[in-house]
Image (tube, rainbow, N blue to C red):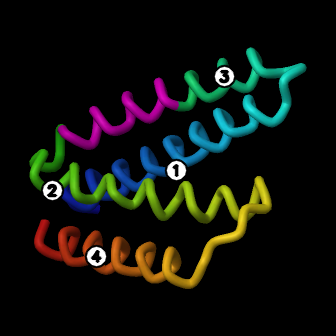
Amino acid sequence: MTPVMLGVVLVLVATLFEGFAHVFFKKATLDIARKAAWIGIGVAFFAVEVLVYTGALQFLDVSTAFPLGSVSFVATTLLSVWLLGETVTPTRWLGVGLILVGAILVAGQA
């Protein structure tokens, strides 16, 4: 695996951690009895996300890594549907698809 490819993979892993963090924060609003626990888990996931993303910056230019980070919108949408049962409109799915296309274009030029 090339260093650039490793950087891309690390950014994508970071976006998963960010997506889970957002879901845990939402869970904190839904489960008042365990609010502090959900917030703590969310903060921990954000901390890991920052460390993984920082590692990715060793291999990628910021001008590549930052746009790839937009995949976190995709991850958060998918996780919110899966774990929270949220509904996503066709227009939002179109937006998610456009984000993916943009990220693929950026990754292809990395």
User: Quadrant location of the C terminus?
Assistant: bottom left
Marks 1 and 3 sit apart, C-alpha to C-alpha, by 17 Å
What number is the disc on residue 16?
Answer: 1
Asked if marks 2 and 4 touch (Cβ < 8 Å), the reply is no
Q: Are marks 3 and 4 in contact (CB under 8 Å)?
A: no
Q: Position of residue 7 (x, y in %)?
A: 26, 51
Q: CA distance from mark 3 to mark 4?
A: 32 Å
Residue annotated with mark 3: 39
Mark 2 in CB contact with mark 1 (< 8 angstroms): no
Answer left or right for 107 relative to 40.
left
Quick check: 89 left or right of 31?
left
The disc labelled 3 sits on which kind of residue?
Ile
Ranked by sequence position, the earlier of labels 2 and 1 is: 1
Across and down, in percent, residue 93 comes to 52, 79
The N terminus - image quarter = bottom left
Q: CA distance from mark 2 to mark 1?
A: 18 Å
Residue 19, compared with residue 25, is above or below; it is: below
Determine whether 109 is above or below 73 in the image. below
Residue 10, percent from left and from top: 36, 49
Q: Which mark is residue 104?
A: 4
Compared with 25, 7 (above or below) is below
Q: Which residues are magenta?
A: 46-57
Q: Earlier in the sequence, mark 2 or mark 3?
A: 3
Q: Is residue 12 magenta?
A: no
Q: CA distance from mark 1 to mark 4?
A: 16 Å
Name which quarter of the figure residue 87 lies in. Answer: bottom right
